[in-house]
Amino acid sequence: MEPMTSLDSPTAPSGTASSALFARALEVTPGGVNSPVRAFRAVGGTPCFMSSGSGPYLYDVDGNEYVDLICSWGPLLLGHAHPEVVDAVQRATSRGTSFGTPTLLEVELAAEIVDRTPVDQVRLVSTGTEATMSAIRLARGFTGRELVVKFVGCYHGHSDGLLAAAGSGVATFGLPSSPGVPKGSTAATVVVPYNDTAAVKEVFASYGEEIACVITEAACGNMGAVAPVEGFNATLSRLCREHGALFISDEVMTGFRVTRSGYWGIDGAVEGWVPDLMTFGKVMGGGFPAAAFGGRRDVMSQLAPVGPVYQGGTLSGNPIATTAGLTTLRLATDEVYARLDEVAGTIAHLVSDALGAAGVPHVVQWAGNLFSPFFVDPAEIAVVQNFDDASRQSLHRFRAFFHAMLDQGVYLPPSAFEAWFVSAAHDDRALDKIAAALPMAAAAAAAARPDEDR
Ligand SMILES: *Cc1c(COP(=O)(O)O)cnc(C)c1O
């Protein structure tokens, strides 16, 4: 999640359809957007209003084409408007859009998730926020304990208890990171620097008997791409087991994106450990609102109606979302994952080469096929391991780079604290367009001065 800093109110260049729409949006919606990062506050300027997408491309209301490196923040593994997904959704829609009863599709989507991951059972929900919030309630209900351990810079959605920022110190009880979150909601959240095994051990040494769960992004994508250091997740899993706490691996971003079984396919499957609970979203909805949490059968059977822990949703397992997700997952074959890795590798190297050639200090990092450049000085920070490291970026360089790419038709995440996402639809033409845009963007980053765009 990007830090809550903002530039001056964005000023709209006149005469474009996007800026006209933005002016209307500002009248009827706070900041003109329905999710803060879309407002371009971190980079300045006017957000582009998109009207359509096709394969690797987005088209805005002014008719500009962009190579999309957000892919709806992860869900669009196959690119925009994949013909088979569109067709399946259209057929499903004609059969009715919501029943409020169980359906075959929900069973099939759950079975697909159970088949790909180490979970025994899943419960479907509509958003990643619901998935993590519900997993935490379940962990507390199962253990009869209240403390939740989370990491600085890991984003798990916007529920109260997880909107906790670290105070000073190595591990601290969370302070609300947003007005409106009661102190009581984050008082049971312990916040620890990411990748800091020693700090987690200290927390367990002090509060081991009170900890319900540790929740972490399987690999962090919400401060840019920051992979866990070797053995980090395994250690979290072991510490939880030793202290009777549950280990929740949040794979809302990485699940079904970095391998067919998510980031767990890269670490737990290889090292031989299994999270107690996992959360999923994004790709599994195929561009529709669908998410899930799942895990051990004995834990999941504490959920209503089997057990006493309440959780429910009117549109949970919605047939259209379920169809889009199931169709996407069934098309996400080994060849698709190989293509994603290849595309991500190509783009990351192009970016690093261009920034290097222009003399812009940076490191490019990976977490599976998630990647992002950090505009830090590699002499000071060779590897970005946590949010403090990520915060030492030259944000003015990212802003200049972002706008130069946008002007040349490449749509990057509008924040230096986000991973970049590719799709299997990113073809040679899309890669060529990125390659052609990079030298000028790298030059703009090199020339940027800290205050000039304020
Ligand atoms: C996106 C995300 C969420 C929240 O999902 P929403 O569908 O936006 O509520 C939770 N955890 C992680 C790791 C995410 O990337």
Image (spheres, rainbow, N blue to C red):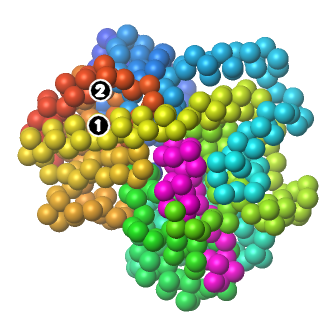
Q: Position of residue 350 (x, y in %)?
A: 22, 37
Of 333 and 185, nearer the camera is 333
Q: Residue 431, labelled with which disc? A: 2
Residue 308: which quarter of the image? bottom right
Which residues fall within the magenta stretch? 240-269
Q: How far apart are the alpha carbons under marks 1 and 2? A: 8 Å
On screen, residue 211 above or below 154 = below
Badge 1 or badge 2: first in the primary sequence: 1
Specify whether 124 is left or right of 260.
right
10 Å crowding of disc 2: few (<14), some (14-19), many (20+): some
Which residue position holds label 1? 346
- Give whichever of 112, 316 is nearer the camera: 112
Residue 27 % position (x, y):
50, 25
Quarter of the picture containing the C terminus is: top left
User: Considering only vertical position in the picture, is 280 above or below 15?
Assistant: below
- Seen from the viewer's position, the closer of residues 25 and 416 is 416
**Residue in the picture at 81% in, 67% down:** 298
Q: Is residue 274 visible?
A: yes
